[in-house]
Amino acid sequence: MKLMTLATLFALSTGAAYAGGTHGGGHGEMMDIGMAGQKKSGMRTINIELLETDDGEMLFEPRDLQFKAGETVILAIKNIGENEHEFVMDTVHAVAEHKELMAKFPEMEHDDPNAVRLQPGESGQIIWTFANAGTFEFACLIPGHYEAGMHGALTVN
Ligand SMILES: [Cu+2]
């Protein structure tokens, strides 16, 4: 299961031919939300923390993200919580589909450029170019975490 990517599972579960490029794509592929970018000097870094509150809420800090279309940024993501978490960003539609897949295949780990999964205390990084304006979503799709609060709006202007 670990060797299967989300894209592969998606293709299997829908029975669709996987054309690539629009859903949870492979490395280097253009998605609706953009594509993996190259690191350059002077690039904006956005720190994102994944955590739980004492009353059982799971959340991202900040709760919402805004970018400019065409902007390439470093997303510096740290799990400061006590549970394993992930950061996935995609269209609202794709996040909902991936969430269903995660419910069916809880052991699944992402191997997608638009996602990172982190153990408690672990940090990760995504360098990303937000190519298209639109309203997207970021979330943790480990079963139950979305419902506990781990999702937010990602707006590209
Ligand atoms: Cu989580």
Image: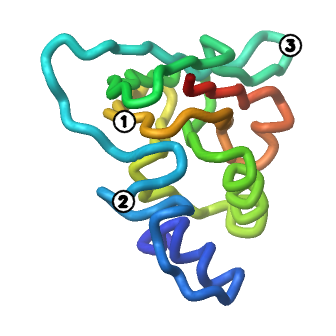
| Residue ID at (65%, 37%) | 136
Look at mark 2 in the image and give the residue it sits on: 29
Q: In the rendered view, does 104 fall on the left or right side of 29?
A: right
Which mark is nearer the camera, 2 or 3?
A: 2
Q: In the rendered view, does 114 fall on the left or right side of 100?
A: left
- CB atoms of marks 1 and 2 within 8 Å: no
Q: Which residue is more in the foreground, 127 or 107?
A: 127
| Residue ID at (36%, 35%) | 128
Task: Say which amino acid is labelled 2.
Answer: Glu
Tell me if residue 5 comes above or below residue 152 in the rendering. Answer: below
Which mark is nearer the camera, 1 or 3?
A: 1
Look at mark 3 in the image and give the residue it sits on: 55
Where disc 2 sits, the SS reads: loop
Seen as rendered, the residue at the extreme left is: 41
Q: Measured from the top left, where is residue 112 in percent x and y?
A: 44, 55
Task: Say which amino acid is labelled 1.
Answer: Thr
Query: Label 1 to label 2, Cα distance in Å?
Result: 11 Å
| Residue ID at (80%, 27%) | 149
